[in-house]
Amino acid sequence: MPLGVAVNEVNNFDSSNSNMPNDGDYHCLVEAVRENSEDEEKPLEVDFMVIAGTPAKAGEPLQQGFKFTEKFFKTDKADGKGGNAKRLTILAIALGLTTRQIAEDCKANNKPLVIDYTKGVGRSVCLRSKTELYAGKKEEHKGKSFANIGFNLFSPKDPAVDGWKKDQAHLARVPNWIPYVKGGAPTKPAPAAPTAPVGAAAEAPADPWG
């Protein structure tokens, strides 16, 4: 079943009335993060803006500058779907707020993974938007399609997205990819780099993550 949280749902999907970009692969800037740390059932809300990418269908307009909001629930109880903690962790890794090595170490040692997601503002991620038919248990959603990101969130320097179009100025400020080594020592992520304005020239300062 789709595990992503849909911002908008439609009977017959039409990108003109959706608060999500057209299906495709995108490099997105995080413009804002809203978090209610006192209520575990309220989602983390992230405002994204597309800064580069490719729609899935040939001939569709480029989505550069398109803004949308995605919700990330903190517990499975909040939406009854499951996988929410994993999804939040994937977001943190994609943003360079932690590493998979640290996340796996916390899980193995039954320690909480503490992340300040507000530090993701000004950073960027790659994500895949895909429309999927609802396959859950809620009767009111059956037969409807959802614009969905699911677990498809990546660091812009993850080898999995090597072929995706990216904004080069923002790409230069992304941490170098740290491959996961099972049983390896936890590796701390690098501090955030200065935010580049959208459309800035590619001659960014030397990569501070290297």
Image (cartoon, grey):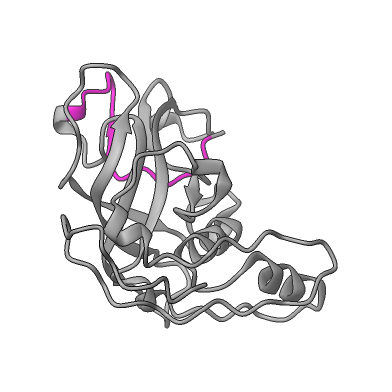
* Residue 196: percent from left, percent from top: 23, 68
Place of residue 33 in the rendered image (x, y in percent of width and height, measured from the top left) = 30, 70
> 104 or 138: nearer the eye?
104
Report the label total. 0
Relative vertical location of residue 13 with respect to residue 136 in this rendering, above or below? above
Asked if residue 79 is positioned above or below residue 60 in the image, the reply reads below
- Locate residue 96, reporting x and y percent: 49, 69
Q: Which quadrant holds the N terminus?
A: top right
* In the foreground, 61 or 37: 61
Instruction: Give the dominant element type of the magenta stretch: helix, strand or loop.
Output: loop
Q: Residues in magenta?
A: 2-15
Identified at 60% across, 58% down, the residue is 86
Q: Residue at x 37, y 78 (%)?
A: 119
Q: Is residue 71 left or right of residue 113?
A: left
Inspect the magenta stretch and tell me whether residue 147 lies in it.
no
- Left or right placement of residue 32 versus residue 91 in this view: left
Look at the picture and state if 150 lies above or below 13. below
Q: Position of residue 191 (x, y in %)?
A: 45, 82
For the point 17% across and 65% down, the residue is 197
